[in-house]
Image (cartoon, helix red, strand yellow):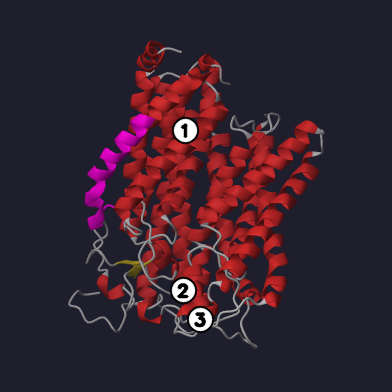
Amino acid sequence: MEPAMGMGLVALMGAAATVAGCSEDLESDIGSQSNPNSQVQLAAQVGYPHRIFNKAISGEPPSNAMYCAVGAGVAMVLIQSVNASPLLAIAIGAFVAALLNGVFSTTAYMGRNASQTRFNQYVYLDVLRNQLLSLMGHAYITTFCIVGLSYVMWHHDLIGHPFPFPVIAMIWGLAVGAIGSSTGDVHYGAEREFQDFKFGAGLNAADSGNITRFAEAGIRSSMDNAWFCSKFGGPVTGIAFGMTVFLDNWRSTAFSGWTAVVVGSAIVLALIIYNRQIETYARKKYGPYPEYAGDIEA
Amino acid sequence: MTDITIIGMLMEHWVSIIGIILGGICIAVGVHFVPVGGAPAAMAQATGIGTGTVQLAAGSGLTGLLAAGYMYMTLSAAGTPGISEVILICATGAVGAMIMITVTMLVGNWVYIYGVGVPPASAKVDHDPITGDSQAPYVAPGTVGQGMPTVCFVSGAIGGLLGGLGGSLVYCMLMWVNGDAAISSIFAIGVFLVNAVLPSYNIQGTIEGFHDPKFKRVPKAVLACFIASLLCGIIAVIIPGMSAFGGV
């Protein structure tokens, strides 16, 4: 393959991954999936019933791995059995994955809220109706992008990766879930869910479950959360996944053998140094907590 | 197939079984290095990455596996890769996993610092063993730390390295046995998950990295993963011989 063509494909994959990362995080924010879900689940039990969507189907990595593997499986069958156009096949595969997301979201919301009736947490059908399509829409975008970039990796005329198409999609689905769960979800769980508390600290264990239930206007819904998280948590998740896909594939495409290993190690070293810089910045900017009563000097 | 044939297959592929065991142990030790804060970290209530042990280890290790799989294919164009090529493939996988985990930790720290407004701090040590920075005054009240200070970041990078290396080694060994990328990749994912799940019983939800007292439990995980990987290795060698039983 021409080097320019290879770099173009890597850039395309990085761009698709950026979109996928962003939509994955927003999907989990709307549905309160993954770790911040523990607070949404707890809220009603400690006396704060709410109208936030609640769907801890599983951790984000397994659920996204499943959507992407299903999407890629359907696309592969269509491409190989009826000779469908890859773009159309990927779109249909992503649509099937979005339908699966809809099924899981509905059963998770109904099941979880029905089991919390004793805490005055009811099944709100309008909440289900209003959020479900946006959940499925975001799942569609995520799956479409990841199955698309997996197709580019797998197709023998493009990058030609030896793993089967659905396995590549499954691994990237697992990775996007792990990244979304580790980065963007913190913006939702530590900041948006507890906006009533002063900015600049994590959740005090004594305030567990006391999630913010009232919005800028009226009662807070999951759409309000997606609006807030789309300003920071979602885009940075996209950057993280895009960077992972781009940097990893760039070093393998532009360099070969031990050079690729050395370039990769240099990237890791640069990230460690940059992390140290932002850590120092945060310590200087925010300073120690005034409540600290120990004898260790800041 | 007689028992003798099975034993013959195992004897023939003993190097691959040892490789799978070594890979499994690398994964198990690597999981202990990854700073995971679990659900509390997602609320900036605990130091580490805000997700589960297995999910993060699998996310990074399998990203490394993708890089290793591609490198194996490139190198196998000139014949079955030998020991020196396997070392290069494992290094590629290790670096791929390190890139994924360091990018994740860095962007995670962006969210902690700029989105939540907290400085990264560990609650398990008074001073960062690498930078010497004090930690306790920067831990928010009512929490057990937040974000990834330098020691956690470096520990996480080492965890990614070991996870990626172990996953790639298992893949190479499986390729030596059956030569089929599809079977090997799926089986390597399985072996990876076995060896990522077992140590999570040691970790019990959260660990900050090599400076965490829980890290001392590593020998138990190594023993457990040795046994599990040995079983996985034996099954991995027997599967290609299944056709002799009349199977696929």
Label 3, secondary structure: give it. helix
Q: Is residue A184 visible?
A: yes
The residue beneath circle 1 is A259
Image quadrant in which the N terminus of chain A is located: top right
User: Which residue shows up at 40% across the image and 67% down it?
Assistant: B40
The residue beneath circle 2 is B116
Label 2, secondary structure: give it. helix
User: Which residue shows up at 32% across the image and 58% down it?
Assistant: B208
Residue B89 position, x and y percent, is 45, 29
Amino acid tagged 3: Phe
The residue beneath circle 3 is A119
User: Which residue shows up at 74% across the image and 36% down it?
Assistant: A77
Q: Counting other residues with Cα less than 10 Å from the Cα at mark 2, is it few (<14), some (14-19), or many (20 or more)?
A: many
Residue reaching furthest bottom?
A218
Viewer-closest of A108 and B214: A108
Q: Counting other residues with Cα less than 10 Å from the Cα at mark 1, is it few (<14), some (14-19), or many (20 or more)?
A: some
Q: CA distance from mark 3 to mark 2?
A: 30 Å
Residue A298 sits in which quadrant?
bottom left
Q: Which residues are magenta?
A: B209-231
Q: Is residue B211 magenta?
A: yes
Amino acid tagged 2: Val
Q: Is residue A246 visible?
A: no
In this rendering, is residue B103 above or below A87?
below
- Nearer the camera: disc 3 or disc 1: 3
Q: CA distance from mark 3 to mark 1?
A: 60 Å
In this rendering, is residue B240 above or below A206?
above
Q: CA distance from mark 1 to mark 2?
A: 38 Å
Amino acid tagged 1: Thr
Dots 1 and 2: beta carbons under 8 Å?
Answer: no
